[in-house]
Image (cartoon, rainbow, N blue to C red):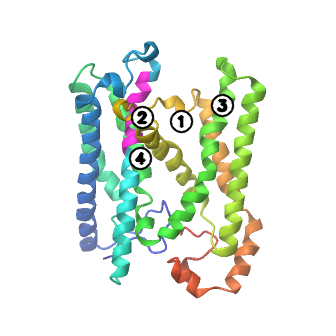
Amino acid sequence: MHREQEGFSFYQWPARPNRAVESLMWKGALVHALAFSGSILALFYYWFAVADRYAIFLYNHLGATPFDEQTRSRYWMCGLVASGAVLTVYTFFNWFVGRTAVLRKRTYDPPAWWRIWLLCVAPLAVGIPLITMKVNQPTLPWPLALSCVIATLSGLALALLPGAWAARQPFRLALLAVTSLGLVPCFLLVRVVELPGFGLLSKPAAYAVAIGSATLGAIWLVGLAFLQARWWKYLPQTWSLYLGGLCWSYLLLPLAHYLFLTPPEFRYISVAENFFARTFWAQMLSFLTALVLAAVINHRYFHPIIKKAHENPTDSHNQLYNLPKHHLSRSGDG
């Protein structure tokens, strides 16, 4: 199979292949897109048409109504939960197929994430509004249906990104996943600085939580960066690490909440406030703090460590973890 991304990055757009190969790539991507679109639409149909809406969206819970502020957020959070399911299944699928191919001394290259995503846009942009605006009661107004589409497509883009790594460099993906956990406190806890304005927390406590969470995240990131630079001659790129943190915070954790933190007989979709800030400035502060910490591990302090490690490479170690020499570099994702 044609390899679209030789020395690829987590988010890189590959060079355009010749027309015949490109046609085959689009056909392969279409199969994946149909599977993902169908699965996501099936979930939306279940949540909005089959399941008990009073359970899924907690109507009447603590006085909640179908269109109050919190309940409205549950509708578009469905898109992130569905995308989290795609991320989990697709990553495991690519890992399994990739490892099977290696055992057969072959390679497996999944379709480029952006091809699959583009082919999913039309069916999801049409199917989600048809489901949410036409079936069961109450139906959603078009702004809420549109928010469901936007959340789903945004989450799906993140969900498809790790697929190629899972197939071809699973150990590197595992390193990235473990390291990017250090950004989760920034995404989810720095936003507590807004709570004093709502009378929910004192200012000293809010700032202590925000600063403490960012500090713990920084310690985790720097520690993992040092280990990777020392033992695997590798540092993840800033944006790859940042996107990994987004996947944890806004796809996998909402999915985990739905599957494991709600009663089996009464599963419901979380409100957005469990994962997102109430105010724009607090959310931007969380995003910016996480971005700064993601950039920290590419600081020049780690460069001599990687250079020294390259002077004494361990071929057997590289082969064990499927990290070819030409992929071992400072910007190790590329």
Q: Are marks 1 and 4 in contact (CB under 8 Å)?
A: no
Which mark identifies residue 77?
2
Badge 4 is on which residue? Answer: 84
Q: Which stretch did the figure color magenta?
A: 71-82
**Earlier residue among tags 2 and 3:** 2
Answer above or below: position of 131 versus 317: above
Q: Magenta-highlighted stretch: main secondary structure?
A: helix
Q: Which residue is mark 3?
A: 192
User: Gap between marks 4 and 2, in whole Å?
Assistant: 11 Å
Alpha-carbon neighbours of circle 4 within 10 Å: few (<14), some, or many (≥20)?
many
Q: CA distance from mark 1 to mark 4?
A: 14 Å
Spatial CA distance of label 1 from label 3 is 11 Å
Q: Are marks 4 and 3 in contact (CB under 8 Å)?
A: no
Q: Which amino acid type is marked by label 1? A: Phe
Residue type at mark 3: give it. Val
SS class, disc 1? loop
Q: Which residue is mark 1?
A: 275
Q: Secondary structure at mark 3?
A: helix
Disc 2 residue crowd, few under 14, some 14–19, many 20+, Cα 10 Å = many
Q: Is residue 248 above or below residue 60?
A: below
